[in-house]
Image: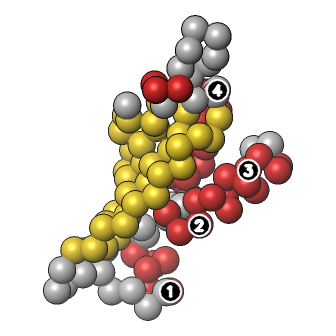
Amino acid sequence: MKTFFGSVFIEKERLEEAGIKYPIKLEYYKQINEDEISTYQKPKYGIEIIKTEYKPEYTKVENKQIKYVTNDEIEANQILNIFKTNQVTPINSEEVIVDLFRNKF
């Protein structure tokens, strides 16, 4: 099961710096991996990011699911908040998670 956490459009200034002239939306979802829940284990939380590029010719959608990130819901929410605030895209999401756990937020 997944629940919507939040969305953001990448700031126009950041897009212009990268030479991009169309809007990009990022959506963040918290996943609860119910299939792996047992009476002896905590739920396992994952993250899904959906990136939508609104190009003049067409719309391009890219997504990334990271099935298991933590078994602490508060920690999952903190990560998603960091992702949303910093406009993390699917392509660099795994690296960001590794850095977050290395520095423990």
Q: Earlier in the sequence, mark 1 or mark 3?
A: 1
Q: Is residue 72 visible?
A: yes
Binning the other alpha carbons within 10 Å of mark 2 as few (below 14), some (14 to 19) or many (20 upward) gives: few
Kindly report which numbered mark, 1 or 3, lies closer to the viewer in this rendering.
3
Instruction: Locate the N terminus and report the quarter of the image it occupies.
Output: top left
The residue most toward the left is: 57
Distance CA(mark 3)–CA(mark 4): 15 Å
Nearest the viewer among 16 and 29 is 29
Binning the other alpha carbons within 10 Å of mark 4 as few (below 14), some (14 to 19) or many (20 upward) gives: few
Q: Earlier in the sequence, mark 1 or mark 4?
A: 1
Q: Which residue is mark 1?
A: 17
Q: Is residue 55 left or right of residue 76?
A: left
Q: Amino acid at mark 3?
A: Leu
Residue 20 point in image, percent of width and height: 39, 86
Kindly report which numbered mark, 2 or 1, lies closer to the viewer in this rendering.
2
Nearest the viewer among 90 and 27 is 90
Distance CA(mark 2)–CA(mark 4): 22 Å
Secondary structure beneath disc 4? loop
Binning the other alpha carbons within 10 Å of mark 1 as few (below 14), some (14 to 19) or many (20 upward) gives: few
Q: Amino acid at mark 4?
A: Asp
Kindly report which numbered mark, 3 or 4, lies closer to the viewer in this rendering.
4
Q: Earlier in the sequence, mark 2 or mark 1?
A: 1
Q: Residue at x 57, y 29 (%)?
A: 44
Q: Which residue is mark 4?
A: 72
Distance CA(mark 2)–CA(mark 1): 18 Å
Residue 101 point in image, percent of width and height: 77, 46
Residue 79 point in image, percent of width and height: 61, 43
